[in-house]
Amino acid sequence: MSRQELIGPQGLRQDGRRASELRKIKCTPSVLSQSDGSSYIEQGNTKCLAAVYGPREARQKAQILHNKALITVEISLAPFSMSERKKRKKFDKRLLEIASAVKQTFEPIIMTNLFPRSQIDIFLQILQYDGGMIQICINAATLALIDAGIPMLEYVCACSAGIVEDTTILELLGTPELTVALLPQSQKVTLLQLETRLHVDKLEPVMKMAIEGAKDIYKHLDKISRNYIEDLLQKSNPHPPI
Amino acid sequence: MLYSKTYLKRTKKGNAVKVVKEHYLRDDIWCYVENCTFCKHTEPALLEEARSTKLLKIPHYIVPDTNVLLNQMDIIKHPAINNVIILQTVYEELRHLNLSIYQQLRTLINEGNRHFFVFSNEHHRDTYIERSKGETPNDRNDRAIRSAVRWYSLHLKKASYGNKKIDVALLTDDVANREKAKAEGLLAFSELVEMIRNEGKIGKDRKVPYDDHLTASKIESGIKSGKLLQGTLNINIHNYLEVNGVETQIIILGRSRLNRAIQGDVIAVELLPKSEWTISSTAVVLEEEEETTELNEEIMNQSNELNNESAKTLQPTGKVVGIIKRNLKGSATSNIAENVLISPLDRRIPKLTIRTRQAHNLMSQRTLIAIDSWPKNAKYPLGHFVRVLGPAGDKSTETEVLLLEHDISHQEFSPRVLSNLPEEGENWKVTDEHLRDRMDLRHLNVCSIDPPGCTDIDDALHVRSLPNGNYEVGVHIADVTHFVKPNTALNEEAESRGTTVYLVDKRIDMLPELLGTKKVDRLAFSCIWELNSEAEILNVKFVKSVISSKASLTYEEAQLRIDDKRARDGLTKGIRILNQLAKKLRQRRLERGALTLASPEVRFKLENDSQDPVDVELIKALTPYGMSLTFESSKSLSDSLEKAVLPEDPYFNKLLRILTTRCMTSAVYFSAGSTVAQEYKHYGLAADFYTHFTSPIRRYSDIIVHRMLAVAIDFDKSYSSELTDMYKVQKICDNLNYRHRMAQMAASSSVELHTYLFFKGKLEREEAYVVKILKNGFIVLVPRYGIEGIVYSATKKSAAAAASQKHVAPITYNVLTNSLESTLEDGQKISIKLFDRVIVQIKKPEKERK
């Protein structure tokens, strides 16, 4: 019996959430003026800033794709993002891996064939980190891409879940877990990443839980971006037709 | 509402780190009071019919604070206390302070019928408070507790329960907290006085002043630098002023060097200079001699004399400088000797001082005492009285005492545990659903053979001839894991009990009575072999099955069937074949070098805690008989034991086997992978691998093996994580080993108890064998009763008496020959050696059971 108890006797976790509750999400689109599209998301104490440039002319000729746009993703972790200050190498293997996962997630969703021979750059900066790196990167990138007006098939929303002694838990932070990126309208899964060994029988409930979480995130992102657009419309057209 | 908790933490390197954690405050935490009109909870935990007492006439719920739970858990556990609100603050504080009490609280909460309820006040929007500047965490927690009590009080006033008024009462030991609560208009009490913790105001006995213990950090650095040694205190059962501690066995002599350490404590020891090293003394310390403080010196002097003779066998001595972890979970059961001085039954635990108003009533009663503390200025540790078990010497009281002594939980199974059993109970039947995945073996002639009176039958057998001349033999074990699933209360209970305990007149089950083994269809886990007529295994198969037992026989009945030449039915034929095969298998095992071990009686198991280094003495003592034992392998040992027979004394060989068994370490459970594969061997059975499988009803180890095997044969598609986690399995194994040892010791104590009751008021002379020579006595084994006892050659008083009467010359101890020598009246010299036959007089011990 360990001193740590993930779920207390009244079904509350250490931080007061129930097993199926997400952390508090706060997001703002279009926070940077220089980039073509940007966003800022907080999921609990994990905070991420996303900037999208493009579609623009490809930087390196060798990389040009003749039938579609090239997507690049770069993730950086601020030195002050965790409780201990650490100097990180520029090419942290784990960050590169996550960047490539994010890139692969968006490649089929962004309609890249509309922009041959061009490049779309996604920069993600983690300002504060408290678990759930992949999911926040994907969610921030989605919002920034929408802000940049880049045509996409639909939203991509990511969420993670895990299992502790037969209880499936949403956003089980700190321990390895399962991350799902969902296309909420078509109910398709574009990314499924498992960082731990999980019994086959448990995969289904954990995935279901993560998908439910992703749907909640979608509702939130959708509301925020619609509000933002409406706001923008009102501002650009101060005298709406009666 | 989101709230951030920020605090500073020190890392391993020593850097200060700021930790920010989310802390959500909620609106949906309900009061869980029955019929509350405001809250939306569905399953109320607190009854509308709250209790009221003489002290507080209004019906009320109790809110204890951390210290009350910590110090007065014994009374909180009393069934009279119900409808208790445990605040999350208290719950979490308790978890950090004392895990064992926390576990007890958890069981209380889970039981449900006691209406203990955890209120998440730290996440409630209205009850959460922030630590203000300059406030200590303790003060903050006290304030949080008061804040929650105030919320409840207001909430209950607001809600209407007919005409009834319910209030909450805060229970606290802390005067300041109580006064503050009262100032806020809350009900606060500290009235659990009778069982209150001993505060150490009494017993200021300066006769034995103890040294201060070192501080934790000093101990830590001392151990790191090698100046101090860490170990578990293991007090010799015959001589409780001497200690074999630490891995390398350091002897600690005398109470003052023991420095308040109690049996089982993890201690830090400082080695004494070499000049004070000694050899292990074999003298027995009698109770009356304990008071004389010179005794220690005496032993020391004796040892010093011995030093010259056997300088090579010097053992280091040391003194206790600190106690790293107290072993306070074991409560002492005891007789009240004086007003407030209690002498525990386990002589390795010192006497205790308690404070009670009922000293008179407690005289010659067995009571349960909890040890609280041992201040520097007290000669004996302080404790408090928990409950009376019954009059001393009474059979049921003594049985309960020995169960408590061996840490065996013997309560009835809780409703929560029983709810995990199939609802049908006795009428449970095998259905087609069970048959789907299982092999149907109901057509076979399956029978069970057990000792008479055995009710927990868990295995059955069958055999049949195959067309190719071979035999198919099946062993069918009750499929307990079908009913005992992981992560259930039932499993948890079985895991902690570990084994069924057999006492002389009682059985304490590991699992509640599952399903009887009558002649009906049963689920089984079967192992089916194909053997040839030479009993060589050709093929083996494990399968889950359904069987139908045709007969349940006792050993006697089975033997009768074998001998009865007229019986020709299938079942009898089968038993005969099995008997022949078993003989062949046994022969082969003996050839491989399996040992035939012995214990004094079939029903009497050996005690493992007296691990005396007899082996050297044993060989020495055997030489006069012209025998020797060889230890190179189990095979040679087995052979030499086989040869060591005295024709005129048939018991001699058995005695030798008993003593040999005692020298060996008993087999233990371990997790494969925690040791190298070469260590897997089972010495006594001469097998490379060995595990239990056949008794899942009474051994938890078998349940684990069943689960693993079920996964291995692809029967169970999923399994809980504990099966693949080496550390978890090892932890379970450690517990099983402990429980197994305790069960064996309890069983032997039970035999001892019944022997004692048998000898009550009797005086018998009986033949006995000397099994160990001590400096001032010897231990004898009486084969007829299978009991052991110490014969003191001379206590201090009797030695003096003997000397004055000059009838008997004092008995002296000869180190060289390891024997006791004396001269009789007529001048004839006698000596008592190991294995000698003596006549002893047995009588009921006057006061103590041991």
Image (spheres, coloured by chain):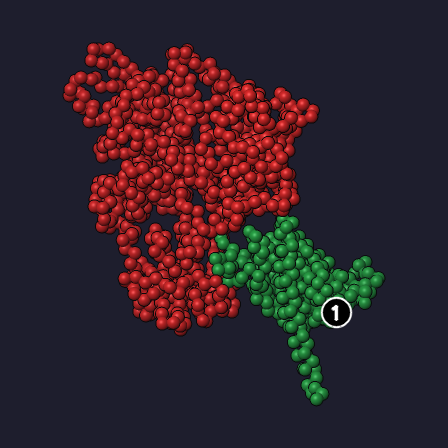
Chain colours: A green, B red
Left or right? Give the position of B594 relative to B472: left
Q: Is residue B311 above or below residue A183?
A: above
Question: Which x, y percent locates residue B645?
Answer: 43, 14
The image quarter containing residue B759 is top left
Question: Which x, y percent locates residue B335?
Answer: 26, 40
Report the residue at 15% width, 21% height from top.
B804
Which one is nearer the viewer's eye here, B452 or B65? B452
> Circle 1 — which element?
loop
Report the residue at 21% width, 46% height from top.
B360
Question: Which x, y percent locates residue A134?
Answer: 65, 59
Give the crowd class for mark 1: few <14, some 14-19, many >=20 residues within 10 Å: some
Q: Quadrant of the C terminus of chain B?
A: top left
Report the residue at 64% width, 38% height from top.
B439
Left or right? Give the position of B615 relative to A214: left
Report the residue at 41% width, 62% height from top.
B46
Left or right? Give the position of B462 relative to A99: left
Which one is nearer the viewer's eye here, A23 or B43? B43
Question: Which x, y percent locates residue A63?
Answer: 80, 59
Residue at mark 1: chain: A
Left or right? Give the position of B232 relative to B334: right
- Disc 1 marks a residue whose amino acid type is Ile
Kindly identify which residue carries mark 1: A150
